[in-house]
Amino acid sequence: MQRSVIRRSLAAKLVLAFLLVSVTGVALAALFARWATYREFEQLILERTREEYVERVTAYYEENRSWVGIAQYMYRPATQPPQNEVPLDRGQPNPQPTLAFILVNERDVVVAPGGPFHPGDRPPAPLIAGGIPIEVDGVVVGTVVTTGNPPEIDPREQAYLARTNRASVYAALAATGIALVLGVWLARTLTRPLRALTQATRAVATGDLEQQVAVRSRDELGELATAFNQMSADLAQANQARRQMTADIAHDLRSPLTVIGGYLEALRDGVLQPTPARFEAMYQESQYLLRLVEDLRTLSLADAGELILNRVAVPPRALLKRLAATYQLAAEQQEITMTVDVPGDLPDIIVDPDRMIQVLGNLVSNALRYTPEGGQIALGAKAVGGAVALTVADTGSGIPSEALPRIFDRFYRVDASREEHEGESGLGLAIARSLVEAHGGAIAVASAVGEGTTFTLTLPA
């Protein structure tokens, strides 16, 4: 049995959340406002009624000079003239048991009942202490005590409270409607970039990597959209680089294989006679293939983080002296001067000497290739903060400024015409960067056409 699942969109959830929070807040605010209004209104009525009560009993005592008949006087309308009637007997039921006040005489005996107190009762002293004393000619003749019962509310006051309650209900309904409208608007505003990201992500999943979404804000959603755009651009660039790399590898493999295959076919058919020169040509092409395969293997190991480095402490001077000794003969044959300038107080660098010679050797080979006769190649080193910078500078033809950003890309050649003649695979500088970064360092280049090129390797000391 297949269970049906009701899927609610994020927008609907946000609307419900905004509405729930708004309704809860409005309901709590309305209940608090109603409670506060009723309480203050009740307090106002209590104070007003108490003032009227005090005025009436004070006027009664000033006129009669005693509390006799005060109970009958207080329980009839204030407009009815007082009459000297016999006071209520003790124990007689209170004509108005809900009256909010009682009157006690100077001996703290109830003379005007109210609430649970009857004439002749003695209320607790703390209750009397909170009452309002009645003074006549400077003498306290009694006390008005609040019983705690709420005063009666007349119809007009009840109508006012009803109108106040209706206004609170209308305000709550209006606030709920506004909250619903704002919730829908906010939910759509918040989910619009998410919907765009979802569509773009699905497009990327189908293979369309060049996806960009609009960045509409600078908040977390804007940062997410920016990060997605960068990721999409990087993926598209990496995919293009992969395709270009595949094409370059196929091209670099096809050229020597074509040469070798052509020679072998001609030798097999007897078109060409086997000579040492022809075997040497096939041998050189096979060596080029081996170098290309080895370079690709080195790059793959570096990319996977599986390149083995035998690191030891090496003085920079010794490393550069070894490099100069390796290429000194080639430099002399091309009438190029090679110098080494290294201060004696430099700290050692922790590197794999063979791998570092491979990196520096690639740079020196390029310098020899592009430096004319009478030029100069300078090997140097200096301290830079907590690191050591190794430099290989030449006075060769230089690199065009538009080529500098891609100089370390795989299979990139500034001069493609040199490929067939000098066996360049376009991987040398890419390998150099990978090896330097594997050592925790960085490589940079500065060059100007006609002035020469300087490569700088910064390695931790």
Image: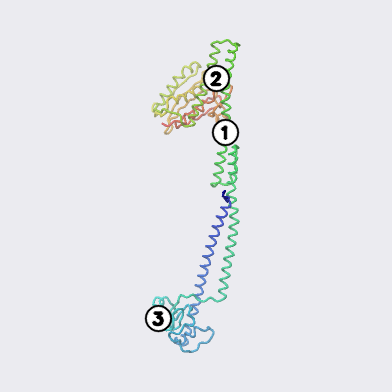
Kind of residue sitting beneath label 2: Glu
Q: Which of 168 and 253 is in front in this view?
A: 253
Q: Nearer the viewer, residue 20 or 402?
A: 20
Image coordinates for residue 138, horizontal then vertical, percent: 42, 82
Residue at the image position 55 percent from the left and 10 percent from the top = 275
Q: Which of marks 1 and 2 is nearer the N terminus?
A: 1
Q: How crowded is mark 1: few (under 14 residues within 10 Å), some or many (20 or more)?
A: few
Kind of residue sitting beneath label 3: Arg
Residue 129 placement: quadrant: bottom left
Toward the front, the furthest residue is 1
Disc 1 to disc 3, C-alpha distance = 99 Å
Disc 1 to disc 2, C-alpha distance = 29 Å
Residue indicated by mark 1: 239
Quick check: 403 left or right of 134?
A: right
Can you say which quadrant of the picture contains the C terminus? top left
Q: Which of marks 2 and 3 is nearer the N terminus?
A: 3
Q: How crowded is mark 3: few (under 14 residues within 10 Å), some or many (20 or more)?
A: some
Quick check: 3 left or right of 102?
A: right
379 vs 98: above or below: above
83 vs 154: above or below: below
Residue 131 placement: quadrant: bottom left
Image coordinates for residue 82, horizontal then vertical, percent: 50, 87
Q: Nearer the viewer, residue 71 or 255?
A: 255
Residue indicated by mark 3: 122
Q: Do the residues labelled 2 and 3 touch (CB within 8 Å)?
A: no
Element assignment for label 2: helix
Kind of residue sitting beneath label 1: Asn
Residue indicated by mark 2: 422
Element assignment for label 1: helix
